[in-house]
Structure formats: C-alpha cells, structure tokens
Amino acid sequence: MGGIKHMKKPVIGISGSLIIDTSGNFAGYKRSYVNNDYILSIIKNGGVPFIIPFNENEEVIKAQIEMVDGLLISGGQDVTPKNYGEEPLPKLGDTFPERDDFEYGLLKAALEAKKPVLGICRGVQIINTYFKGSLYQDLSYMGIDVLKHNQVNNPARVTHSVTVDKNSKLFEIFGEEKFMVNSFHHQAIKEVGNGLVKTAAAPDGIIEAVEKTDYPFLVGVQWHPEMLHESVEMMNKLFTRFVREASNE
C-alpha cells in the first residue's frame, strides 16, 4: 500500500537537575526540571525534547540514553573539584556531586552508542572533566584580568565576543570567525581534556568551546545559546545541526 512517508523527528534528551520548593504546601519537596529555553530551542529546530530526570541508577541511566537520539547536557551547579583532582577553594559555588555522576553516566552511554552530544555551560565543563581535563574553580584564580563573564540578568542579550577556530565544527556551523555571545559562568576550562580541542575563546583567553574531532558530533560551549534562540537568530544554527546529527541522516 502506498502513502505519505512521515519522517520521524529525532528525540533529544536534556539532562535534568533537581530544584527544591521553598514555600507553599510542598516546601522542601524536590522536583525534576530543566530551564524551558532548552525545550523551546530543540522544538524550534526540529527535534522532540525530553527531560532526562536525575537518578542514581546505572541501569536506568543507560536505558535513558537508549531511548533518545541525542544528548544535551544542560547548565547548572559547579562541577565538584574532586572530579579533576583538586580540593575545594573558597570561591567554589554550589555543587551537586550526584548530578556530576549522573551526567558522566549519560555521557558514557551516549559515547558508547555514538550518539551526538551537545554541552552547554556546565555541560562543557562536564565534558571536559569526563575526559580528564580540569577547571578554574573561579575566574579570579586565573591570575589575570578577565572580562565580565556573568552578566547577571538579561539572558537574551549578548555581551562579549568569541573567536572561533576556522578548522572547527563551530565555524562550519556558524560560518563566522567572530561573534557575540551571552555569559553566565564563574568557572572555566583550565586544562583541556584528553582527545578534546579548544575551538573558541574569549578575548581574555578563556576557553569558550571544545570539540572531539575523532567523534561524529561532540561539541561543548561555555555560553548559553538556548537563551538566545529568539533574540540572536544565528544561534539556532547550532541546534539545527545538533538535531540533524541526531536524525541519522
């Protein structure tokens, strides 16, 4: 029998975190969540978003990855310094060690299945530390004058520039060597992880993106392109490419 063939949209799993209610009948109650901009960015660019809820069951984590076509590692808390062999310094922010382990598990399963991976903000730091790289626990520990990398509010506004390596996937995706991004972080990549390459940097030298060149698609960015999906149209190119990679076309 004939008929119209409908293309299945790729399912993108977005790593979730926990938030705790602070008031009302359920004060102290834990809820699984991601910021809604991640959801909207995936929908806008042709994917089907699913929140991957935080859990500590290795078998469940592996099964969660089996159910999606691509993994987006979202932003959030500071990565625990023990993951890269350091003790906590005074300016370290809130950490969630169990979430670190959860996302390392998701990443491991995604890599074994050769599924595309995109890391955003904390996500790029999770990727870097998974591959045995390290972080500056706070930008002040770099020992240099740096740009303002936490714009505090107005997430849809770009505030500083990044320069992209012309031999990178990012340059292939955006088609521009230099452009403006938003910024919401106080940590940054120090030593780049094994098998990763730096593909973008801010004018002060802070690493803004890494990629794994011997893998079909593994890209991490330090800025928040999902928060720019309405105000800076070019940022959708990253999600469009990511979703396309997940579609196995």
Image (cartoon, rainbow, N blue to C red):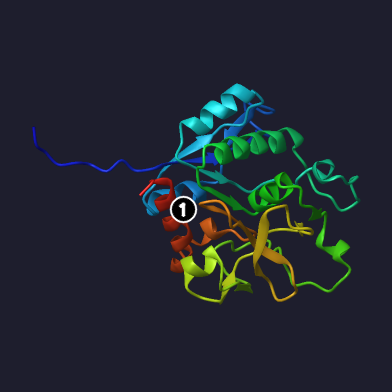
Height in image: 201 above or below 129?
Answer: below
The residue carrying pointer 1 sits among few (fewer than 14), some (14 to 19) or many (20 or more) residues within 10 Å by Cα, namely many
120 lies left or right of 125: left
Q: How far across and down, in percent of the image, does residue 240 sit?
A: 41, 57
| Residue for point 49% across, 31% down | 66
Say what amino acid the circle numbered 1 marks. Phe
Residue 77: in sight, yes or no?
no
Q: How far across and down, in percent of the image, does residue 178 sit?
A: 57, 77
249 lies left or right of 35: left
Q: How far across and down, in percent of the image, does residue 143 sit?
A: 89, 68
Residue that sits furthest to the front in the current view: 214
Q: How far across and down, in percent of the image, does residue 6 sit?
A: 22, 41
User: Of helix, strand and loop, which one carries label 1?
Assistant: helix
Q: Nearer the viewer, residue 182 or 219?
A: 219
**Residue beneath label 1, please?**
242
How many dots with numbers?
Answer: 1
On-image quarter of the N terminus? top left
218 lies left or right of 187: left
Q: Nearer the viewer, residue 184 or 169?
A: 169
| Residue for point 14% across, 42% down | 4
| Residue for point 75% across, 45% down | 79
| Residue for point 62% across, 61% down | 223
Q: Nearer the viewer, residue 133 or 239?
A: 133
Residue that sits furthest to the left in the current view: 1
Height in image: 140 above or below 89?
Answer: below
Height in image: 51 above or below 235?
Answer: above
Residue 35: in sight, yes or no?
yes
